Image (cartoon, rainbow, N blue to C red):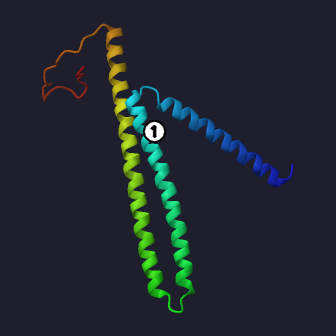
Amino acid sequence: MVPYQIIAFRTLNGLVLLMGLTLAAITFATEGFTAQERDRVKALNESLGFFDRDYQNQLGEFSAREQVCLSKFISASCLNELRRDAAQARRQYELAKELLRRDIRQIEADVRYRQRLDADAARKDRQGTTVTPVAEPSPFASDKVRLD
């Protein structure tokens, strides 16, 4: 095989593996979600896509403005204003993305918490134990005190 074919083959294998892992993660991640949570995560992911498209449009506008600035004889003030606007747009874009991602992570954390509670309750049912309040340990007791 020619070296560029080897690189292309490895890249293709890597992409297939990445897609498979992503699909597995999505399937695993949606397990345990309520319909409302699943809809909310879907809406948040769509919003992320909207912000990405909007930001790409803004980059195109900045590129056009840059060409206008460069066509001027004295373009320093125009370019400085363009850089400020581009930096502000980038900060707003990153902040919006981070807020949406935080909301998605919070929903996923709630689901994991609920699953842990269910698993703990099922384990205690299998063991036949009940959860009873435990008195506060003595400050003189050893560090290996069980509280459950």
Residue at numbered disc 1: 42
Q: Is residue 110 left or right of residue 139?
A: right
Q: Is residue 124 left or right of residue 76?
A: left
Q: Is residue 22 left or right of residue 37?
A: right
Q: Is residue 76 above or below residue 61?
A: below
Determine the residue positioned at 50% across, 49% down: 49
Count the numbered circles shown.
1
Determine the residue positioned at 57% across, 38% down: 22
Q: Quadrant of the C terminus?
A: top left
Q: Is residue 110 left or right of residue 93?
A: left
Give the image quarter of residue 71: bottom right
Task: Give the image location of residue 43, x and y in percent.
Answer: 43, 41
- The residue nearer to you, when weighing 101 against 4, is 101
Packing grade of label 1 (10 A; few <14, some 14-19, many >=20) is: few
Task: Give the image location of residue 126, x and y in percent.
Answer: 36, 9
Determine the residue positioned at 81% across, 50% down: 5
Task: Give the image location of residue 11, x and y in percent.
Answer: 71, 48
Name, please, the residue furthest toward the right: 1
Task: Give the image location of residue 41, x and y in percent.
Answer: 42, 38
Give the image quarter of residue 87: bottom left
Q: Secondary structure at mark 1?
A: helix
| Three-letter code, disc 1 | Lys
Name, please, the residue furthest toward the bottom: 73
Determine the residue positioned at 39% across, 48% down: 100
